[in-house]
Image (cartoon, rainbow, N blue to C red):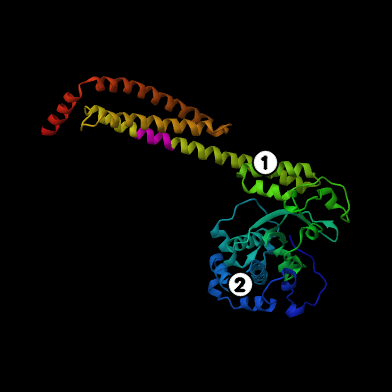
């Protein structure tokens, strides 16, 4: 969750070596100076911050550098909540609240960076895993970022880049050692729970990471992370969690952090599946209710002796429309492969209601056919007589 104090190193250009590491087209001094000129009123919304960055920087490297600088310069580490960590999805309001409080834990640093970077057109993900310092694994989960800059994946740790803890006090000191790091270097101190986010063709196992020295020369299976990322981007939430669980298990479980992460993944699968079931059930209910509404409209029309007059095709379409809605309702229910326990009875009852309504429709069709057998001229006369009364 935090980094130890490191020895002081002089950086060229006001201690700001971002330009060297990011290979920006703009002078690093200019990046810093331009971000220092952002109006304070424009720093409490991610939209206003990105508008400012977009207006002053042209390429992705400059924009990423400006974003990293602003966050590490202005957001302080939240010591009181340093052990907080969850799988919640931050809303836009919650992200803007980070800007208002100017405090963040590792998860919030990475969420904020991800939100800003993605708004700037830089594909960025929040990565979860754990770290080690001085070759010792830290027994706390951590969060960082991965960004695709000019078609190359780089890693960022804004929490460690913002400063360090000393005697339970946060010492702010921007460190660009954790800006735009190559995956082969980043793995020495950070390992994601899911090996996909190592961005390595030969990922390290959790057991290898826990060793004092990471062996670069080793025999491990080849992993095509590029193709795996493409699949990931096209998967549903449940599919992403299921594939992540498989990769994590194959990569090895080495400590309680791995076990805890796997437990949360299984919980998330159940939670996401519950959401899917509820969505499909609600869609099915919506179709059914609309069908019942139209069915009641038809009954009212039939009770009114099919007046005012309508043609046979138009009347029959009223019935067909009801049947179509009931069919769509059944289709949504059939997509629910394994109903969750709390909704099982509701789904069964809905199916019964649909079947009963279909039976009622068959009965109404028989009446309608009798009506159709009546001479058309006579029906038109009935309609005209009704209008003249």
Circle nearer the viewer, 2 or 1: 2
Sequence-wise first label, 2 or 1: 2
Looking at the image, residue 365 sits to the left or right of residue 166; the answer is: left
Residue identified by numbered label 2 = 57
The residue segment tinted magenta is 286-293
Vertical arrangement, residue 259 with respect to residue 36, above or below: above
Taking the image as drawn, is residue 134 in sight? yes
- At which x and y percent is residue 155? 72, 60
- At which x and y percent is residue 331? 49, 32
| Secondary element at tag 1 | helix
Question: What number is the disc on residue 242?
Answer: 1
Looking at the image, residue 238 sits to the left or right of residue 181; the answer is: left
Crowding near the residue tagged with mark 2, few <14, some 14–19, many ≥20 C-alpha atoms within 10 Å: some
| Secondary element at tag 2 | loop
Question: What number is the disc on residue 64?
Answer: none
Residue at 33% from the left image edge and 34% from the top image edge:
294
Count of numbered tags = 2
Q: Name the quarter where the N terminus is drawn.
A: bottom right
- At which x and y percent is residue 215? 88, 54
Looking at the image, residue 275 sits to the left or right of residue 261; the answer is: left
């Amino acid at each position: 969750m935090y980094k130890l104090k490191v020895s002081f190193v002089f950086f060229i250009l006001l201690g700001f070596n971002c330009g060297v590491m990011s290979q920006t087209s703009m002078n690093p001094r200019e990046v810093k100076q331009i971000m220092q000129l952002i109006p304070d009123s424009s720093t409490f919304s991610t939209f206003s911050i990105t508008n400012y960055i977009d207006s002053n920087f042209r390429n992705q490297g400059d924009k990423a550098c400006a974003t990293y600088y602003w966050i590490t310069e202005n957001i302080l580490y939240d010591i009181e909540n340093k052990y907080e960590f969850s799988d919640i999805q931050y809303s836009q309001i919650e992200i803007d609240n980070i800007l208002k409080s100017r405090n963040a834990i590792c998860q919030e640093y990475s969420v904020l960076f991800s939100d800003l970077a993605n708004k700037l057109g830089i594909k960025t993900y929040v990565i979860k895993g754990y770290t080690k310092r001085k070759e010792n694994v830290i027994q706390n989960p951590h969060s960082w970022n991965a960004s695709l800059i000019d078609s190359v994946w780089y890693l960022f740790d804004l929490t460690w880049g913002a400063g360090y803890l000393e005697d339970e006090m946060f010492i702010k000191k921007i460190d660009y050692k954790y800006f735009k790091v190559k995956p082969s270097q980043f793995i020495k101190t950070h390992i994601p729970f899911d090996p996909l986010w190592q961005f390595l063709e030969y990922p390290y196992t959790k057991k290898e990471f826990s060793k004092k020295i990471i062996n670069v020369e080793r025999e491990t299976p080849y992993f095509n992370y590029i193709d795996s990322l493409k699949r990931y981007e096209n998967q549903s939430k449940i599919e992403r969690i299921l594939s992540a669980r498989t990769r994590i298990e194959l990569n090895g479980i080495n400590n309680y952090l791995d076990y805890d992460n796997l437990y949360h993944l299984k919980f998330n699968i159940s939670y996401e599946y519950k959401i899917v079931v509820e969505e499909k059930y609600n869609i099915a209910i919506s179709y059914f209710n609309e069908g019942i509404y139209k069915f009641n409209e038809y009954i009212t029309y039939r009770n009114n002796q099919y007046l005012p007059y309508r043609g046979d095709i138009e009347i029959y379409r009223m019935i067909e429309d009801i049947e179509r809605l009931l069919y769509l309702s059944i289709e949504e229910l059939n997509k629910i492969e394994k109903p969750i326990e709390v909704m099982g009875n509701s789904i069964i009852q809905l199916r019964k209601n649909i079947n009963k309504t279909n039976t009622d429709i068959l009965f109404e069709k028989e009446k309608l056919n009798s009506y159709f057998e009546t001479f058309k001229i006579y029906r038109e006369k009935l309609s005209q007589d009704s209008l003249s009364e």
